[in-house]
Image (cartoon, grey):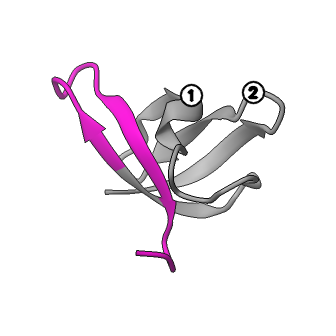
């Protein structure tokens, strides 16, 4: 699933994204662990891997769209 970065705090490696369906989700440093990403900018398009129920999904991984 794809989303757009709303905010990102480099000090804590956490932030929030808005999915293409309009749902806003927060993520923490664990979502970037092992990706090599050190910075995300607002407006950047990303791919999400989520888990949990549709009503309360959890962001497991954030990846830049051009990276696999």
Question: Does residue 38 sit above or below 22 in this rendering?
Answer: below
Q: Is residue 64 magenta?
A: yes
Numbered circle sitting on residue 47 = none
The local crowd at label 1, few if under 14, some if 14 to 19, many if 20 or more residues have their Cα within 10 Å, is some
Label 2: element kind:
loop
**Residue pictured at 76% horizontal, 55% vertical:** 41
Disc 2 vs disc 1: Cβ atoms closer than 8 Å? Answer: yes
**Residue pictured at 48% horizontal, 39% vertical:** 31
Query: Residue 25: x and y, percent?
Result: 47, 31
Question: Does residue 61 sit above or below 1 in this rendering?
Answer: above
**Quadrant housing the C terminus:** bottom left
**Quadrant housing the N terminus:** bottom left
**Residue pictured at 41% horizontal, 35% vertical:** 23
Query: Residue 14: x and y, percent?
Result: 66, 31
Instruction: Report the span colored magenta.
Output: 49-68
Give the spatial CA distance, label 2 vs label 1: 8 Å
Question: In the rendered image, which quarter is residue 52 located in?
Answer: top left
**Residue pictured at 63% horizontal, 49% vertical:** 5
Label 1: element kind:
loop
Q: In the visual, does 40 lie left or right of 36?
A: right
Task: Determine the residue located farthest toward the right in the rendered image.
Answer: 11
Q: Is residue 40 magenta?
A: no
Task: Determine the residue located farthest toward the bottom in the rendered image.
Answer: 66
- Residue at numbered disc 1: 28
Q: In the visual, does 60 lie left or right of 29?
A: left
Question: Does residue 20 sit above or below 68 in this rendering?
Answer: above
Q: In the visual, does 3 lie left or right of 52?
A: right
Query: Residue 3: x and y, percent?
Result: 47, 54
Q: How many marks?
A: 2
- Residue at numbered disc 2: 12
Query: Residue 32: x and y, percent?
Result: 54, 45
The local crowd at label 2, few if under 14, some if 14 to 19, many if 20 or more residues have their Cα within 10 Å, is few
């Amino acid at each position: 699933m794809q989303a757009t970065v709303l905010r990102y705090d480099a000090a804590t490696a956490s932030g929030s994204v808005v999915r293409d369906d309009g749902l806003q989700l927060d993520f923490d440093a664990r979502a970037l662990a092992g990706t090599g990403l050190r910075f995300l900018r607002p407006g950047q398009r990303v791919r999400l891997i989520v888990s949990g129920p549709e009503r309360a999904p959890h962001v497991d991984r954030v990846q830049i769209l051009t990276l696999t």
